[in-house]
Every structure is written in C-alpha cells, then in structure tokens.
Image (cartoon, grey):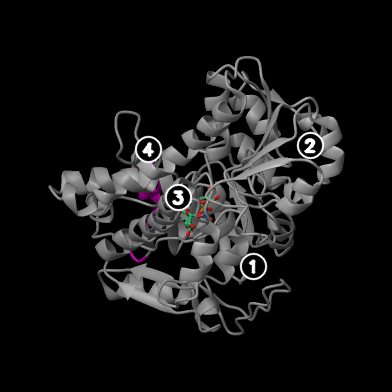
Amino acid sequence: MNKVSFVPHSPQSLSSVGLVSMKVAVIGLGYLGATTAVALSLVGHDLIGIDPDQAKVDALRAGRVPFFEPGLDEALAQAQSTGRLAIQAEHTCTSADVDVFLLCVGTPQSRSGMGADLRYLESSIDDLAPYLRADAIVVGKSTVPVGTAEALKGRLATLVAFEPYLSWNPEFLREGTALKDTLTPDRIVIGVDEPHSEALLRQLYQPMADLDIPIVKVDSKTAELVKVAANSFLATKISFINAMAEISEQVGADAVLLAEAIGYDERIGNKFLKTGIGFGGGCLPKDIRAFQACAADLGLEQSVSFLAQVEDINMRRRTRVLDIAREELGDLTNRRVAMLGAAFKPETDDIRDSPAMAVAELLWAAGAHVVVHDPKAVDNVRRMYPNLTVADTLEEAVAHAELVVVGTEWRDYALADSAVLGHLAANKLVIDGRNVLPYRQWQANGWKVIALGRNLEHNPVEVLV
Ligand code: UGA
C-alpha cells in the first residue's frame, strides 16, 4: 500500500488528501463491477478489473463502456489516464499484490427455481484462491441469500493454507445514476465479522467517509439481508401505490394525486411512489423472488409471503394495459401498436425484465403488430425480440399506429410534439403507462389519453417532468 495525495478532477469533487492507496481487484465488470472499478480508481486506489468475457475486456481497454450508463465513458477515460486502472480477462501474478478482492459478479435467478444462482461467485473464489495473500481480504458486493458469505468463506478455506478473510459490502447503485451512487452513496454498509476486514474496508472507503457519508458496520449476515431488504422495500412501495392505482381506476379516483398527498407525510415520503406499469430490471424482480426462496429454505416462507403479492400486483399492471387495449380496440389481431420505450427505466439500455417489453410481448401474443422505439435500447430489442418490429425514430413508430403505449418514462416522450404525432397515427389513442405525458396538450391535439391509475377528467393536474 502506498501513501498518495490525490484530488480527482471529477464533478463529484471527491478529495482524499493523504489517502492510503490500496491495490484492489474487481471481479466481474458488468454495471456494478465496471462502475466500482472506475470509481475506486478515480478516488486514488490502484485497480485491476477482471472479467472472463474477452469482448468486454477489449471494449473497456479501448475506452468503451459496453452498455449505456450516463457519464461512465468519460469517467473510464479519466480513470485510464491516471494509469491506475488495468483491465484483464484473468488473474496474473499482479493479483498476488492485491489487498482487497471485490466480488461483483452476477447472481441471476437460477434456471430451476426462484433462488439465486451462485455459480459465478463460486468460480470467482476458486480463481482468486491461488493468488490470495494471508493478509488480503475478499469482499462480496453482489446481492445474495443470507449465509452466502459464510459458505464462500468455507469454500475458500479449503483452497488456501490459512484462515481467509471474507466479508460482505452490498452495493446500492442504480442504473442510470451508477457513478454518482458509487462515488457519493447515501450510506456504505460493511458486513464484517472480524477487525482486520473492517480496518481495510474503512481504508478503502476513506474518501467517502471524508465526505461524511455514513458507514454502517454490521455483521456479514446482516449485510447480506440489508440489500435484499432494501430492494424488497422499494418493490413493495411501488406495488403499494400500484394497488392504490387499481382501486383508483375502479372507483374513479386518482392514484398520482393520492401519492402526492400521502408523500407529504415525512414518515411515508414521496419517493418511489410513481404509479404505472411497475418495476422491472435486473435487480428488483429477481431479488424479491430469491428472498422468497431463501426464506422458504429457512422454513420462514410466511415472513415474506407478502412479496408474492408484491409481484402479483406488479404483473397485473402489465396485463391491465392489454385489457385497456382490448376495451378500446376490440380484437387486436393485426392492429398496429407503437410501444414507446423498451428499457426498464430511462437513462439505461437495459431491457432485462422490462415492464415495457413485457407489455409489448403481451400485445404481440394477442395478435397485434407491435413497433418498438427506444432512444438507447433498440439494439438489445433487436437481439432479444426478433418477433417485434423496431423503429429507429419515434415518428416511424407512431406512423399508422392505432394505439400508442408509453412504456418507459424517457424525456423524449414527455417532450414529443403530440400534434405532429397525431398527424402520423391512424388513431389518436394513447395509454400512458408511466404517467409522463402532458396530457392536456395531447388532448388539445385530439388524442384520447388513458393514464394508468389516473382520473384525468376530474383531476386536471399535470404530472411535470
Ligand atoms: C435497484 C435499486 O434501486 C438499487 O438501490 C439497487 O442497488 C439495484 O436495484 C441493485 O440491486 O443492483 P435499479 O434496478 O437500477 O436499482 O432500478 P430502480 O431505480 O430501483 O427502478 C426499478 C424499477 O422500478 C424500474 O422499472 C422503474 O421504472 C420502477 N419504478 C421505480 C416505478 O415503477 N415507480 C417508482 O416510483 C420507482
């Protein structure tokens, strides 16, 4: 470990004069790993990023982030210019200098059930074991079932000739704001069971601690639980407001106004109460399923049985769009539908478990000719959904459409010219699945607007973007 003085010229103005630079290996260079490696090298640590996917390694080495994440390309270039970020496909002898191994590999839903597939974590442990020094620490950041750290430590202990250090440090970054969330998180949770790992993790995060970012020290099991608890709570909040939307639609009330009204209560808060077609992405859906599987393994199925309802509500919001489409158009066979948005949320090209794509598939399965547009995700749609038509422009998607559905709350859609789109569409009918359209302007241009959970007739309040 070297003493360095480093003041990064990043917008986050993280400065840590006198930081004790550490040699850190990040295993897995997806959203989490790539962002973590870039961020930690920017604050002054010496990073090796390792991923077996040679194409990903080549792209990152060439300064290209292989997915869309705002600001990460520039930050990667900045990190590379410091000379403190090496990217490679496997461990080399330099791994023997590493002080901290950060495990950032995926923990996808297992093919055989709702639980998490831990095989990438296990192979990461096997691969790093030959290089692990007795005083180096291994730290998991991926989302895992409780007890995983203990099991991985046991596995590692069989591969080395000393008692290894293994702890858990869950990550809370969101796609779309990943860099900011990593450099200036709300909190850092370190799940440690002995003082050596705690000391090294505190040193690793000194630049964040200097900014008064709280560091919450817990044991490794609590740390594992914190992450799934946080994501379960967020999913529950969204499904709660979407349950209110179901009731509001039935009785003619307005769930957007309801959310605003309850959100002023500080105990409730106004965040994560946006009603629409629900949550998706690579984390919330799989994490609530894995949590239910983990609880069932512990014989505690009942403790989180409400998560099954959270998921049911989420799925019903998707089919609600199909129901409305049928109510409005009747038989959907060969009806042209424009799906605006494919990404699971704006500012990403990620379409994993995307509500917009789920709705597009439902409409397609009902016979509709679905044309999908997205400002960033069309390449992924082409690859994953060869059955759907992809439009390169918003206008192309809306041309001749008998129904327009907003599936992702991109600003482009909120700011679209509804008069121009009205001339292109065959039928001026739009279902706003994300409550982002300035609907009075759309109505003034002749559109019939149906907004999920809203009563536009009685509550003339615009949602502002
Ligand atoms: C989520 C968590 O927010 C992060 O804290 C966590 O680190 C991450 O998962 C993870 O486990 O790695 P992310 O998947 O990037 O982050 O997405 P979110 O911003 O949580 O949004 C999830 C979904 O909920 C999106 O489809 C979004 O459109 C939807 N959503 C969000 C709503 O429908 N309503 C809202 O009010 C908020």
Residue matched to label 2: 394
Q: Name the dominant secondary structure of the magenta segment.
A: helix
Residue range of the region highlighted in magenta in the rendering: 123-135
Q: Are marks 2 and 4 in contact (CB under 8 Å)?
A: no
Q: Amino acid at mark 3?
A: Val
Distance from disc 1 to disc 3, alpha carbons, whole Å, reads 53 Å
Query: Which comes sooner in the sequence, label 3 or label 2?
Result: 3
Q: Nearer the viewer, mark 4 or mark 1?
A: 4
Is residue 111 or residue 273 the one in the foreground? 273
Task: Identify the element where label 2 is drawn.
Answer: helix
Query: Which comes sooner in the sequence, label 2 or label 4?
Result: 4
Q: Image quadrant of residue 62? A: top right
Q: Amino acid at mark 2?
A: Leu
Query: What residue is drawn where x is 56% and y is 36%?
Result: 53
Distance from disc 3 to disc 2, alpha carbons, whole Å, reads 34 Å
Distance from disc 2 to disc 1, alpha carbons, whole Å, reads 37 Å
Query: Which comes sooner in the sequence, label 2 or label 1?
Result: 1
Query: Which comes sooner in the sequence, label 1 or label 3?
Result: 1
Q: Viewed as shown, does residue 16 lie left or right of 398? A: left
Distance from disc 2 to disc 4, alpha carbons, whole Å, reads 33 Å
**Residue 121 in sight from this viewpoint:** no
Residue matched to label 1: 42
Quadrant of the rendering where the C terminus is positioned: bottom right
Q: Amino acid at mark 4?
A: Gln
Q: Is residue 300 above or below residue 369?
A: below
Residue matched to label 4: 109
Q: Amino acid at mark 1?
A: Leu
Residue matched to label 3: 251
Q: Viewed as shown, does residue 305 lie left or right of 391? A: left
